[in-house]
Amino acid sequence: MSDHKAFSATGNQMIAEAIRQIDPDVMAAYPITPQTTIVENYAKYVANGKVHTEFVTVESEHSALSACIGASAAGARVATATASQGLALMWEELHIAAGMRTPIVMANANRALSAPISIHGDHSDVMGARDTGWIILFAETAQEAYDNTVISFRIAEDKRVLLPVMTTLDGFITSHAMERCEMEEDQTVKDFVGEYTPLYPLLDTDNPVGHGMFANGTSYMKYRSVLRKVNHGALPIIEEYGKAWAEITGRPYELIDAWGVEDADYVVVVLGSAAGNVRHVARQMREEGVKIGVVRPRVYRPFPAEQLVNACKNAKAIAVMDRSDTVGGQYGPLAVDTMAALYEAGLSIPVKNYVFGLGGADVTNELILEVFSNFEKLEKGELDRDLAFLGV
Amino acid sequence: MSQLIEIRWHARAGQGAVTAAKLVADTALMQGAYIQAMPEYGPERTGAPLKAYTRVCDEPIEVHNTITNPDIVVVLDDTLLETVDVTEGLKDDGTLILNTELSVEEVRDLLGVPATTKVAVVDASGIAMDTIKRDIPNTPIVGALSQVTGVVPLDLVKERLINTFGKKFAQEVIDANLESVDRAYKEVSVA
């Protein structure tokens, strides 16, 4: 167990610190709000000689991730960071990074997509990367953004995984708010992630290999089935490293943070910082005898379906709160995942899906109470099951 | 329930409200508290009205939204009173602290705050001009906040200021800031 002095920091500062402690070989990044201070802080570490990282300045996010993929294939330990339109501009490279099995770690400060332009937080950007093969983690706090980032390198570089990992935090809400944090010693982090030994480095000229090769029909399909298997198989490995890190830090790590579900009548499923808001109100409701549990997947890809079902199985009704929309689809991404998991487990618990907090719209206690107040009607089948926009 | 104290800051961009919001949070952290400090982000234009927030609690703070029912409201610029409803959502037994030359009675009349709300005034800009020689009322107002609410003790505010400013500013600037905090602590009037 660690015993460290608490200090104040933003989520972005904590991610920059985590990457500094790990000191990757290469970082190629392009600044975009609200990720900017990660890159800004890291550029200072580079300029001040605190790290040995080769910082590659690029003219766009497309180039940033391209440079990262090249560096990773060459055999380097690689990190980057982006947000919103930047992540969107990386779209084709996201698939290539996962398909080539490059263990890149990328921080994303979750932000809305244009149009209209909003610099504020929601999950529209990350959800666009949902099916690319990347492992995706959601932090609730600045502290967790730090812990997730450290763990990300172990997950990505594990020979059983070898996939890029996206370590995300909510734009402004977590990236820019100052919170009480703790940090492990540099050496502790370095020891935890260890030296990186690439499996098939392109620059090992004695053992020439090809990366990102051409593949036709059946071999392409075979390859993609491996990708699915490897991504899904990462779940116990993520848990393994999470628990190993928790032993060092004393800060718990679960694939799913399930609060109050043991005796809850109703459960809210939600990602990221908003889970704290929901728990805050749920605690107050407990004093009035209303028992609501809060389930927050800390890992979103691969989706921890079994753990989610276990956390939700005793609920009489479930609300899934999505911070992004699948326009034209029936429900938001988290709701679709949750419903599929429940269906597969043979559970027919009524689910109501809410889209909330788009473009940084404030997640007020009143809005959460609105979700809570609908539970009884939902349980009795008196509430329509259409996707609802909260607070509009 | 844990004791959660929520402070909302009203100012114009450039007056240092965000710095003050962080100073209070960092000082509370020195006492072992859990804290949050964040500005309300928007287009950044000097002089534009802005809000900032500080939360202080003896237990971990889970809520991450903006503060709509503050225990304490601090106003760094009284020209905002004409355009911004600074007391919106302020708890009836809450505290309102203003940088102004108006008296407590004048503020009460102007804003019509309930009798249960504590109102405090201090000429933080005047103090800043005397001591720091610039109209940056953010440090002195924290002295007033310390006196009126006790959220953070004066000696720790000053220790924190020395720690933060020590790296960036000359000794005379630090001394001027410390003096401004002391003066606001003494000169604030409450009713």
Image (cartoon, coloured by chain):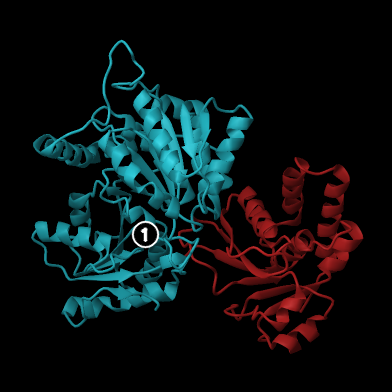
Compared with A91, B125 (above or below) is: below
State the image coordinates of residue A391 (x, y, percent, origin top left). Answer: 40, 77
Density class for disc 1 (Cα within 10 Å; few <14, some 14-19, many ≥20) is many
Residue furthest top as drawn: A206
Q: Is residue A202 left or right of residue A110?
A: left
Decide which of B16, A247 is in the foreground and name it.
Answer: B16
Q: Is residue A185 visible?
A: no
Decide which of A293, A214 is in the foreground and name it.
Answer: A214
Decide which of A226, A241 is in the foreground and name it.
Answer: A226
Q: Is residue A119 left or right of residue A208?
A: right
In what quadrant of the picture does the C terminus of chain B appear? bottom right
Q: Is residue B95 visible?
A: yes
Indicate the colour of chain B: red
Badge count: 1
- Identify which amino acid the numbered label 1 is placed on: Ser
Secondary structure at badge 1 equals helix
Compared with A148, B121 (above or below) is: below
Compared with A370, B1 (above or below) is: above
State the image coordinates of residue A176 (x, y, percent, origin top left). Answer: 54, 54
Q: Is residue A159 left or right of residue B7?
A: left
State the image coordinates of residue A288 (x, y, percent, origin top left). Answer: 36, 74
Callout 1: chain: A
State the image coordinates of residue A191 (x, y, percent, origin top left). Answer: 43, 24
Give residue A69's quadrant in the image: top left
Residue furthest right as drawn: B130
Indicate the colour of chain A: cyan
Q: Which residue is mark 1?
A: A124
